[in-house]
Image: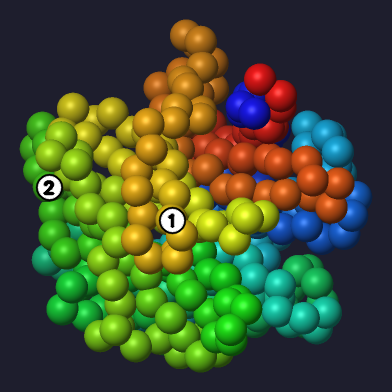
């Protein structure tokens, strides 16, 4: 089995002031057997992201059924941790009356490039509207993550409780006089998926020597009970790429050499990078990876499909 890229699905056309470009960190959710709702961060002319969605056909995601006309999650109140942008996170289907949106909120401060921590919003109408669970983060700063604490995937465990995978940022890397955040991947458990003890988090993935950051860990359980995780790294030479890891317990991961999403041909929407892959299996066992291309999502969201080699 291998992944076959199917092309670009969607990028905002600039008609809406809040969605001039980009569809960052896509998170697919199977709304029903025929529809995949993909949540993503759409940016205005100032580069500030708000969360919207597209509905696509679960058999052919190039077939767009609907696009959100307003943000499903807008900016937080002035002074809050999410007042300068929100991106995905994760979508967790808790029950028929509770859909959780885990998101990363950005805040500008005077003496650092930005801060980014995790919030939760809850939908009671199957993803049409969300209300913030709290005005403050559910994952906030800590000694190992003073600048970034960003949850990117969470799963309910068979034995009870939840396991989440997140990025923690502890500093900055200067490359060509530009500061970039440094981060790595961690995991933490929670009794209810809403309360997290930062002191019990475990570091699971660190950058290789030629990398200065690796993050957006997206974990999913395979049919045989093992776990796979995809994360995106950046090198000192600014080569952005995604990687696949495997684990028997969701904690101890091994990096593979798999190149699942090679860059596109010159001039394509993903000819400079492929990043932030998010996995989805449909009820008929079709497997998709939804991902971003150039400039970390500025050119939109596309997908790949698992096919026989």
2 or 1: mark nearer the eye:
1
Q: Nearer the viewer, residue 21 or 275?
A: 275
Residue under the image location 83 percent in, 79 percent down = 96
Q: From the viewer's perspective, is 93 left or right of 294?
A: right
Task: State the quadrant of the C terminus.
Answer: top right
Instruction: Tell which circle, 2 or 1, labels the residue nearer the N-terminal end.
Output: 2
Q: Are marks 2 and 1 in contact (CB under 8 Å)?
A: no
Residue 5 position by quadrant: top right
Q: Nearer the viewer, residue 250 or 121?
A: 250
Q: Secondary structure at mark 1?
A: strand
Residue 202 in sight here? yes
Q: Quadrant of the N terminus?
A: top right
Q: Work out how far the residue at label 2 is from the one at label 1, CA to CA, in angstroms.
A: 29 Å
Residue 200: x %, y % from top left = 29, 84
Across and down, in percent, residue 248 comes to 46, 60
Residue 171, disc: none
User: Horizontal and vertical percent for residue 93?
Assistant: 71, 72
Taking the image as shown, residue 19 lies to the left or right of residue 29, namely left
> Which residue appears at 13% of the width and 54% of the height?
172
Q: Which type of secondary structure does the marked residue at label 2 adopt?
A: strand
Residue placed under numbered mark 2 in the picture: 173
Q: Is residue 280 above or below residue 171?
A: above
Residue 263, how many percent across, how many down?
A: 46, 20
* Residue occupied by mark 1: 247
């Amino acid at each position: 089995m291998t992944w076959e890229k199917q092309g670009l699905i969607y990028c905002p056309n600039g008609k809406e002031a809040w969605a001039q470009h980009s569809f960052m960190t896509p998170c697919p959710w199977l709304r029903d057997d025929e529809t995949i709702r993909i949540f993503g961060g759409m940016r205005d002319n100032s580069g500030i992201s708000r969360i919207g969605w597209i509905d696509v056909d679960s058999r052919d995601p190039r077939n767009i059924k609907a696009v959100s006309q307003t943000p499903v999650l807008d900016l937080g109140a002035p002074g809050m941790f999410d007042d300068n942008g929100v991106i995905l996170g994760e979508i967790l289907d808790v029950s028929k009356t509770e859909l959780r949106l885990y998101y990363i909120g950005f805040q500008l401060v005077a003496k650092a490039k930005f801060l980014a921590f995790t919030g939760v919003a809850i939908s009671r109408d199957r993803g049409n509207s969300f209300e913030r669970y709290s005005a403050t983060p559910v994952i906030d700063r800590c000694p190992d993550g003073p600048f970034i604490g960003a949850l990117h995937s969470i799963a309910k465990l068979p034995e009870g409780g939840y396991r989440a995978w997140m990025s923690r940022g502890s500093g900055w890397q200067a490359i060509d006089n530009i500061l970039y955040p440094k981060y790595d991947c961690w995991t933490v458990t929670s009794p209810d998926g809403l309360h997290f003890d930062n002191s019990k988090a475990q570091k699971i993935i660190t950058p290789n020597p030629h990398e200065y950051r690796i993050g957006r860990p997206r974990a999913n359980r395979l049919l045989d009970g093992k776990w796979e995780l995809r994360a995106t790294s950046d090198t000192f030479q600014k080569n952005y790429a995604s990687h696949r890891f495997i684990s028997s317990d969701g904690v101890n991961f091994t990096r593979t050499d798999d190149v699942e999403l090679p860059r596109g041909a010159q001039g394509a929407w993903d000819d400079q990078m492929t990043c932030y892959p998010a996995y989805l299996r449909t009820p008929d066992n079709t497997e998709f990876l939804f991902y971003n291309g150039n400039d970390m999502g500025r050119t939109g969201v596309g997908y790949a499909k698992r096919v026989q080699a």
